[in-house]
Structure formats: C-alpha cells, structure tokens
Amino acid sequence: GNTALIGHGDSKIKASEPSKELANQRSSGATASGPTTEPPAKPPKREANRKGLTSSSEQEGPKTPDPKTLRRLAQNREAARKSRLRKKAYVQQLELSRIKLTQLEQELQRARTQGMFLGGGAAILGGDQGLPAGLHSLSSDAAVFDIEYGRWQEEHHRLMCELRAAVQEHLPENELRLFVDNCLAHYDEVMNLKTMVAKSDVFHLVSGTWKTPAERCFMWMGDFRPSELIKIVMGQIEPLTEHQILNICGLQQSTQESEEALSQGLDALNQSLSDTITSDSLSSPPNMANYMGQMTLAINKLSTLEGFVRQADNLRHQTVHRLHQMLTTRQAARCLLAIAEYFHRLRALSSLWLARPRQDY
C-alpha cells in the first residue's frame, strides 16, 4: 500500500513538472522583454477605407480648370513676368541716373573751381556760359522724373498698341472697356508724377525740357492745351449724336474760359514779379537790405507758380475724363488713339527735325 501511494504521488509530481517549467519559461520571457502589453489592434477596416477613398479619387481624376480660369492664370503669369522686367529696367534706369548725376556733380565742382561762380554759386558771372547744357536747372527730382516719364512713354505705347488691336478686332463693349480703363489709369499715373515733381522743381515742368522740341511749341503751363486737344479729336470720334455734340462744345467753351483765366493770372504774376525785382535801382553796388527784402518777396510770389501748374494739370485731367464720360466705349477708344497718334507725330517730327541735313551759310 505504501508503495502504490508513493508511485501515484510520483506520477503527480512528474505530471506537474512540465507545467511548472512552462510557467517558468513564460515568466523568464516576460522578465527579459519587459512587461507584457497587448499588441495594437490592426486597423484593417481603416486601411480598407483609405484604399477605397484613394481608389475613388483616382477613379474621378484631377479636375480640369475651365478655359476662363486657364486664361486668367495665363494673364497673371504674363503680368508677373512683365512686372519683373519693369522692376529690372527700373533699377537699371536708377543706376544710370545715379551715374549721370555723379558726372554732373563733378562738372559742377569743376566749374566752381575754375571761378565761374561767385559767392558759392549764388550769382553767375556773365550768365551760364561755360556750363553744360541744363546743368543749372537739373535737379535729382527732375532727373528721376525724366527717367520715369521715359518708362511711362514705353508703357503708353504698348497700351495703345493693345487698344488699337482690340478696336480692329471689334471686341464687345464690356471687353473693350477694360482696355479703355487701363489707358485712362495709365494717364493718371503721369499726372501723379507731374504733381510730385512740381513740388520740388516746378521750373522743370514749365521749361518743357522733358518734351521733344516740336511738343514744346504747343506747351501751355507745363503741357498741352486741353481745348486744343478737343479740337483734334472732334473729327476722329464720329458719328456723334446731337446731344454729344452739344456737350462737347460746352466742354470746349468752359475749358477755353478756364485756360484764359489761368493765363491772365500767370501774366499778372509775371508782371508783379518783374516789378518786385526792379523796384530798387539796378545799379551796383545795391543796398543789401533792400536787395534781400526784394528777393524774399519775389520768392514768395514765385512760389504761386506751382499752384498755376497744378490747376492747369487738373484742367487737363478733367477734360480727358469728361470726354470719356460723354462718349461711348468705342468712341472713347478712338479718342484715346487719336490723342496718342497726335503726340506720336509730334515726336516723329522732332526726330526728323534734329536729323535734317544742315547747311553752313
């Protein structure tokens, strides 16, 4: 009986030993690899959903923009490219202007060292002989204005070419209006430039050196006469209705009256300025106290010249915009083209005049 009990116990012990060894192995593996954590759940459904979305989007394909959007994108790219080119040209022009100004300053310094000026440049001995042409009147603001005006002329020529092509293609009124508005906005830019330079160097505008010789023949207070401009375009914008003819004639009459009033005011300013300068004896040596008082009074009177030029520019600006309001879009386009062609012919005449063969008599 004891033998059987021991044998049965041994079998129990032997049967339990493998389970203990397996438990020991599991515990040792857990100790080696750290605490056991449950493996992350696999998202088969989510991946399936993603694959489903990808496949559906791939089946739909990229949306092709409509022709209007493509045309607008192309226009934006072209505008950006032209803007970069204009900025590059502008920087080059500024650098060229800086070089020219440096040269002029050197020539001015050379002239001063040669004794052509008295009193540090306050008075010029015997006039301006010996000085480079335009040296006494050219300022940095005037030089920048000349460069900007040249750039404006190039852009103006391009806009006029586009407007002429649009008129010849007989575009609808709404599309043609965009070209007309761009030309008017560009015209406003040159008026802003003139306003800026008038504050610092109004004599540069009045002298007309920024214009060609033929254009200077028709200048009035720093630019063209607006009433003459109306006469030029009257025969280029037909057919006109009776109402349009009455409005344009009334505009021309009011413009002429404003021009006459400004001309009379400028004549009175010139006369008053001359009287102020000659109020004391011109013999030398003058009384310095009276002399400085006269110069101060003359400067105060001369400062009103800027106001006359600004009023004349406002009259020119109003005339062009009022013509645009009185005309249809197609008539306004022909009006702008006629104005541009008129000034183009004046510039061409100046070039032919300067290049003409000259004979020595």
Image (cartoon, rainbow, N blue to C red):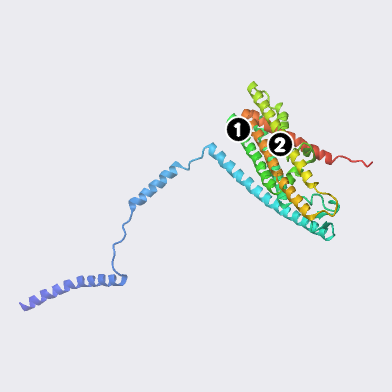
Which label sits on residue 177? Answer: 1
* Residue at the disc numbered 2: 262
**Label 1 to label 2: alpha-carbon separation:** 34 Å
Q: Is residue 202 left or right of residue 52?
A: right
Frontmost residue, 128 versus 343? 128
Q: Answer with the quarter of the image where residue 95 lies.
A: bottom right
Image quadrant assignment for residue 72: top right
Residue 116 appears at what percent x and percent y?
84, 57
Is any part of residue 314 visible from this angle?
yes
Callout 1 secondary element: helix
- The front one of 161 and 223 is 223
**Looking at the picture, which amino acid does disc 2 mark?**
Leu
In the rendered image, the vertical position of residue 148 relative to residue 244, given as above or below: below
Q: Position of residue 98 (x, y in %)?
A: 72, 55
> Depth check: 211 or 287 in front?
287
The 10 Å Cα crowd at callout 2, few under 14, some 14 to 19, many 20 or more, is some
Q: Earlier in the sequence, mark 1 or mark 2?
A: 1
> How far across and how far down the image is residue 271, in percent?
77, 41
Q: Is residue 106 above or below residue 24?
A: above
Q: Residue at x 78, y 39 (%)?
A: 216
